[in-house]
């Protein structure tokens, strides 16, 4: 009995740490077992995105921490995208020494990363003001903060910067592994950003954290 209580306590403590720390800092999924309902919530939410399979695969490992919270899911999606943007930026920095277009793309990606961070920061501020799990005092005010008050605007701008990167990179004369590697990585990042934006939009339209 004591062993079971200790195990339950450790699981609850681990879940608390995952939810309370910045999601953008998460690099590996929590070692907790997700329920069918948790996974179903992720799958259903991802159906609102353009790339539902990628959405589910990138977020399902965190289902036990997200549970059925749109607020947690939205912050997680942005955080996962930020992590991907960081790793992509590292790759581009290695290639930028030998190709001007890669350097330009890296600059656009840095701008995109800044927009994502601003989006996540604003979303956290909204959550703190509204309260996770509680209905906002005004649905209209909540939607205003999610849209005109930057969350959707920042994520949309991030996707625009990524589009600009790939659009200009398509015109690059250089062929071979470098161009393919950079183009593929940024395109994958664009899909994650698109999914995160779709979840932001869905959360904003719901009007409830």
Image (cartoon, rainbow, N blue to C red):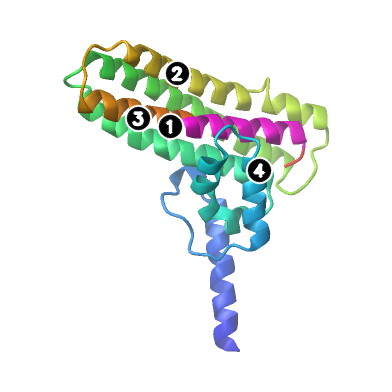
**SS at circle 2:** helix
The vertical placement of 203 against 174, above or below, is: below
Q: Position of residue 25 (x, y in %)?
A: 44, 46
At 66% from the left edge and 43% from the top edge, which residue is drawn?
45
**SS at circle 1:** helix
Magenta run includes residue 196:
yes
At 83% from the left edge and 32% from the top edge, which residue is drawn?
138
Q: Is residue 97 visible?
A: yes
Nearer the observer, 15 or 137: 15
- Indicate which disc, 3 or 2, sits on the residue closer to the N terminus: 2
Task: Name the residue carrying label 1.
Answer: 189
Q: Position of residue 155 (x, y in %)?
A: 55, 26
**SS at circle 3:** helix
Task: Name the residue carrying label 3.
Answer: 184
71 to the left or right of 119 = right
In this view, the mark in front (1 or 3): 3
Q: Position of residue 209 (x, y in %)?
A: 72, 42
Q: CA–CA distance between discs 2 and 4? A: 25 Å
At 33% from the left edge and 15% from the top edge, which residue is drawn?
169
Circles 4 and 1, Cβ within 8 Å, touching? The answer is no
Magenta run includes residue 121:
no
- Indicate which disc, 2 or 4, sits on the residue closer to the N terminus: 4
Q: CA–CA distance between discs 4 and 1? A: 19 Å
Task: Name the residue carrying label 2.
Answer: 163
Task: Name the residue carrying label 4.
Answer: 45
Tell me which segment is drawn in magenta: 191-207
Label 2 environment density (alpha carbons within 10 Å; few <14, some 14–19, many ≥20): some
């Amino acid at each position: 009995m004591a062993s079971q209580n200790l195990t339950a306590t450790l699981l609850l403590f681990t879940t608390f740490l995952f939810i309370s720390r910045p999601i953008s800092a998460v690099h590996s999924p929590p070692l907790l077992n997700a329920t069918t309902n948790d996974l179903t919530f992720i799958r259903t939410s991802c159906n609102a995105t353009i790339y539902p399979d990628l959405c589910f695969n990138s977020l399902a490992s965190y289902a036990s921490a997200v549970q059925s919270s749109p607020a947690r899911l939205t912050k997680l999606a942005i955080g996962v995208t930020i992590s991907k943007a960081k790793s992509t930026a590292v790759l581009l920095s290695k290639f930028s020494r030998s190709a001007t277009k890669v350097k330009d793309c890296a600059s656009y990606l840095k701008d995109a990363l800044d927009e994502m961070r601003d989006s996540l920061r604003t979303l956290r501020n909204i959550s703190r003001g509204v309260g996770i799990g509680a209905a906002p005092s005004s649905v209209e005010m909540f939607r205003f903060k999610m849209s005109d008050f930057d969350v959707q605007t920042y994520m949309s701008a991030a996707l625009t910067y990524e589009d600009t990167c790939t659009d200009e990179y398509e015109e690059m004369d250089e062929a071979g592994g470098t161009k393919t590697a950079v183009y593929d990585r940024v395109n994958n990042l664009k899909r994650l950003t698109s999914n995160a934006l779709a979840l932001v939009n869905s959360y904003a339209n719901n009007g409830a954290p």
